[in-house]
Amino acid sequence: MAINSATAIAHPNIAFIKYWGNRDKSLRLPDNGSISMNLEELTTQTQVTFDPNLPGDIFDLNGHRQAGQSAQRVVAHLNLLRGLRGIGTKAYVKSENNFPEGAGIASSASAFAALTVAGIRALGIELPERDLSRLARRGSGSASRSIPTGFVEWYRGASDIDSYAVSIARPDFWELSDLVVIVDEKHKLTGSSEGHELAKTSALQSARVLDADKRIERCREAIQTRDFALLAETIEMDCNMMHAVMMTSNPPIFYWNPYTIEIITAVHAWRKSGIPVAYTIDAGPNVHLICDSEVETLLSDKISNFKWVKQLLIAHPGGPARLL
Ligand code: PMV
C-alpha cells in the first residue's frame, strides 16, 4: 500500500446511564446498555498515516511519544483495523486533546472514536456509522458512543454484530450544559478496564444490571420529552448504583472524596430551591453537573464560591466523530 493518511476529530461523552462491567472482555460487550451526551467543546484530533516504510507503529499524544499500555492499546486497535484489509502496514498516529490531561475527562472515548474514523479512511475503507461504532467499541466501550451525534444510546446487543450506538437526539434538541467540576487533578488509581473486571465481584452488580433497561427507558424518555425532573432523578440513581457496585467490589474502589460529597449535597439543595441541575460522576472524584443551559452562569458563580475547586470546564451537547 502507498502512504495513506486521514485525520478525524471526536468528542468525549458523559454517560447518563453508565456502562460498568463487560460480559465479554475482549469484544467489550457490556453487561448493560447505556446512554450519553457528546461534549462539543472538548475534542481529540487524530491523524493516522499508514506508511510501508515504517518498521513499527508510532503513537504521539499531545506531542509526546507513547510507550507501555497506552501505546499497546493503540497498536491492538490498529491491528483490528488493518485486519479488515488483511495488511500489515505500520502506522504513525498523532493525537491531540484540547482538554487538560488529568482533568478527569475520560479521553479513551474520543481517542478510540477518532482513531477508528481516521484509521478506516486511511485504509481506504468506507463503513456505515454502526460499523464504526462497533469497531470503536473494541478500543474502549464508551468510544462506541462518541461516533454518533448528540444524545446517544449504546445497545447492549446479543453479540458483536448488534452492540453499537445510535443517536437518539441531535445536539441542538435540548440546551443542556455539562459543568465539569474538577476537585482532583491526579490520575485515577483504578482505571476503567480494571474496574469493569471487578464489577462482577460485587453482589450488587446483578441487581444494577437487571434494572438497567428500566433506567434506559426513563432516560430516553426524559431526553425525548425534555423532562428535566425525570432526567435528574434517573441519572443520579444510575450514577449512585454504579458507585455502589464499585464500593462493594473485591477489592472495593472508592472514587469519591469529601469534595465529591459536598458537591452532591449542594446539588440536592440547589434542585430543591428550583434550579434544574443534577449530578453524575464517572470513574473518579470529579462531578459533572448537568443543567439547563439557562442556569449555567448562575451555577458557575455558585461553584466559584467553593475555593477548593481546581477547575471548571463547561461543555454542551456535541456532534459526531468526523473526518477533517
Ligand atoms: O469506556 P471505558 O472502558 O473507559 O469505561 C467508561 C466507564 C464510565 O465512564 C465510568 C461509564 C461510562 O459509561 O462512560
Image: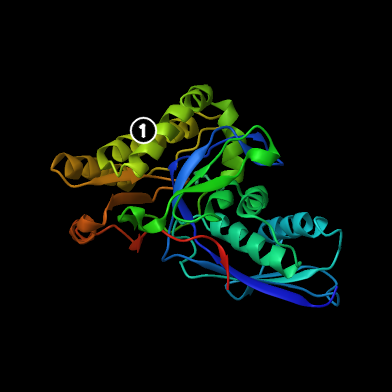
Work out whether residue 96 can be spotted.
yes
Name the residue beneath numbered marker 1: 237
Between 8 and 246, the one lying in front of the other is 8
Q: Specify whether 152 is left or right of 288.
A: right
Q: Specify whether 295 is left or right of 76.
A: left
Q: Specify whether 93 is left or right of 302.
A: right
Residue 248 in percent (x, y) is at 48, 28
Q: In the picture, residue 156 is in which quadrant?
A: top right
Image quarter where the N terminus lies is: bottom right
Alpha-carbon neighbours of circle 1 within 10 Å: few (<14), some, or many (≥20)? some
- Above or below 308: residue 19: above
* Label 1 element class: helix
Amino acid at the residue labelled 1: Met
- Above or below 67: residue 238: above
Image quarter where the C terminus lies is: bottom right
Residue 132 in percent (x, y) is at 64, 54
Between 6 and 15, the one lying in front of the other is 6
How was this image coloured? rainbow
- Above or below 273: residue 316: below
